[in-house]
Amino acid sequence: MSAGIVLGWTSPSITSLKEVYQPNSTLTEEEVSWVASLAPLGALLGALPAGRLADHWGRKSVLLAMTGPFLLGWVLILMHQSMSGVDDRWCCCTSRGSSPASPWAPSQSLSPCTTARWRRTGYVARFISGVAVGAVTVVISLYNCEVAEDRVRGTVGAYLQLMITVGILWAYVLGAFLDYYWLSLVSCAVPVIFFLSFLFMPESPLFLITRGRDEDAERSLKWLRGDHDVRPEMDRLRQLLSRSSSGTVGKMSWRGPTGRAVVITIGLMAFQQLSGINAVIFYSERIFEDAGSTVSPSLSTIIVGVVQVLATYSSSVLVDRTGRRVLLLLSDTAMAVCLLVLSVYFFI
């Protein structure tokens, strides 16, 4: 959910940022676009070492540690906005010779001398948040697959995307009523709640077995499965670990079944990211504004968020019944049609 809030924050906040910096703003359209795009850029870099870190420190430890970057990103935005009031009032004082007003309330009209601070602080905040997004999406996928039973693994795996869409909807709804300062302040609570609740979750049994901690792995499985005999599952995990450690990526045949599976997986993820979904999520309000919709852009964006949640939930329910391939073909076809209609509309 924290990852979804980072992604969804951009859409309502862009409008708020542009209003704050007008009319004497030097924050250009390009600079606003960097505010949006630095998060996925950070996610790209954060995802690269996440798997190795999870193998070394454990899935649970890495997920708990990522609470820090999430909080740091929000705190940097809050500190910037609070201190912007100090900068603006100081600028006014030096020009008018008057004493500054209270600096601790967020300023609603920022002078040009604060825009340089946004470029630095805001860019860094969004990049750090993006790094956390990339890392947690990798590690949560590992953790979910390793703790889930075989019969519900597809459903549990879909919960990652479901909670991302819930986080996006959270940002859309709160962003319709709050400016970007208060939206960031409220969003700080989500990683804190995650940290406090996830402390009581067990480590991945498969990771514990890789570390030779079989007793801890058995206790973890018993916590997850209840009062069932977990010895057969422990044996299956050992066999899985034995098979997976018998080869490396360098020795893998790209023409074999494993190589083809890797190519298909990379292709699916690449096409998913290149489909334009991030642009739609980040600029939903802007799209509806430019389209001249009779419905308010904020409400239209919330509707988009609700549809995303419902569609993702439906997929989590159907994925183990209809299969992955059918859902992929249906969703890809629907996305292609909708993006074609959207592009033709704006082209005309």
Image (cartoon, rainbow, N blue to C red):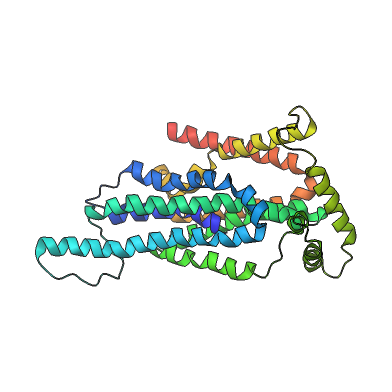
Looking at the image, the residue that sits furthest to the front is: 212
Instruction: Report which quarter residue 117 is drawn in.
Output: bottom left
Rendered residue at 43%/47% (across/down): 36
State the image coordinates of residue 206 (x, y, percent, origin top left).
76, 55
The one nearer the camera, 339 or 216, is 216
Looking at the image, the residue that sits furthest to the top is: 255
The one nearer the camera, 318 or 7, is 7
State the image coordinates of residue 264 (x, y, percent, origin top left).
70, 34
Instruction: Report which quarter residue 221 is drawn in.
Output: bottom right
- Whether residue 94 sits left or right of residue 301 in the image: it is left
Looking at the image, the residue that sits furthest to the left is: 97
The one nearer the camera, 264 or 306, is 264
State the image coordinates of residue 283 (x, y, percent, origin top left).
45, 46
State the image coordinates of residue 274 (x, y, percent, origin top left).
55, 36
Rendered residue at 29%/71% (across/down): 104
- Whether residue 49 sits left or right of residue 29 in the image: it is right
Instruction: Report which quarter residue 222 is drawn in.
Output: bottom right
Q: Is residue 179 visible?
A: no
> Quarter of the image containing the N terminus?
bottom right
- Tell me how many marks there are: 0
> Quarter of the image containing the C terminus?
top left
The one nearer the camera, 171 or 214, is 214
Rendered residue at 85%/58% (across/down): 234
Q: Is residue 227 visible?
A: yes
